[in-house]
Amino acid sequence: MLSQINGLSRHFTEETLRAYLLSRSTRADNGCLVVRGYGPQRGVYQKLAGRAWAHIAAYVVFVGGYDPTFEVHHDCGTPDCIEPSHLRQLSHADNCRERAQRPRCRNGHDRETDPVTGRLRRVCRVCNRQAQQRWRERQAATVADARATYGRQPS
């Protein structure tokens, strides 16, 4: 069963992998079993035990019945959670449908619903409008500087 996990070091058995995952994880207040993988950022570098993803290895060891054609989905939404009750296998299409869209953009604006698809827009219109305004101001300043220095001889 462990041979189906891509990138997993071959020296692990199910018992040693289970102990390794539990030694690298801590219990969060929301019930998640958060694992500390390689790298400085949480949720970005969650590879463990060679180059294998920690949540896939945890699914194989704790839940069992792993099918490599399906993806392991986090019901809790925490990317570095290895709690067995928070993991389940889905097809790629179902996994994409299950992803929760955040109701606010990273700057705190409410996201609008796209009338065509009925889903939240990917780009925040307020942030986009502000970015375009900043660009126009930079361009205007560049043009004003160029006009002010046009025709002057360097001294």
Image (cartoon, rainbow, N blue to C red):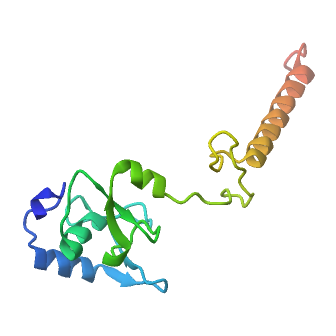
Q: Position of residue 117 (x, y in %)?
A: 62, 42
Note whether 60 is above or below 28 in the view shown. Answer: above
Q: Nearer the viewer, residue 123 or 11?
A: 123
Q: Is 81 left, or right, of 151 in this rendering?
A: left
- Residue at (71, 48) in percent of width and height: 124
Q: Is 120 left, or right, of 146 in this rendering?
A: left
Position of the N terminus by quadrant: bottom left
- Residue at (19, 78) in percent of width and height: 18
**Residue closest to the far top:** 151
Note whether 119 is above or below 16 in the view shown. Answer: above
Q: Which image quadrant is residue 27 in?
A: bottom left
Q: Is 60 left, or right, of 13 in this rendering?
A: right
Position of the C terminus by quadrant: top right
Q: Nearer the viewer, residue 37 or 33?
A: 33
Q: Which image quadrant is residue 147 in?
A: top right
- Residue at (85, 22) in percent of width and height: 146
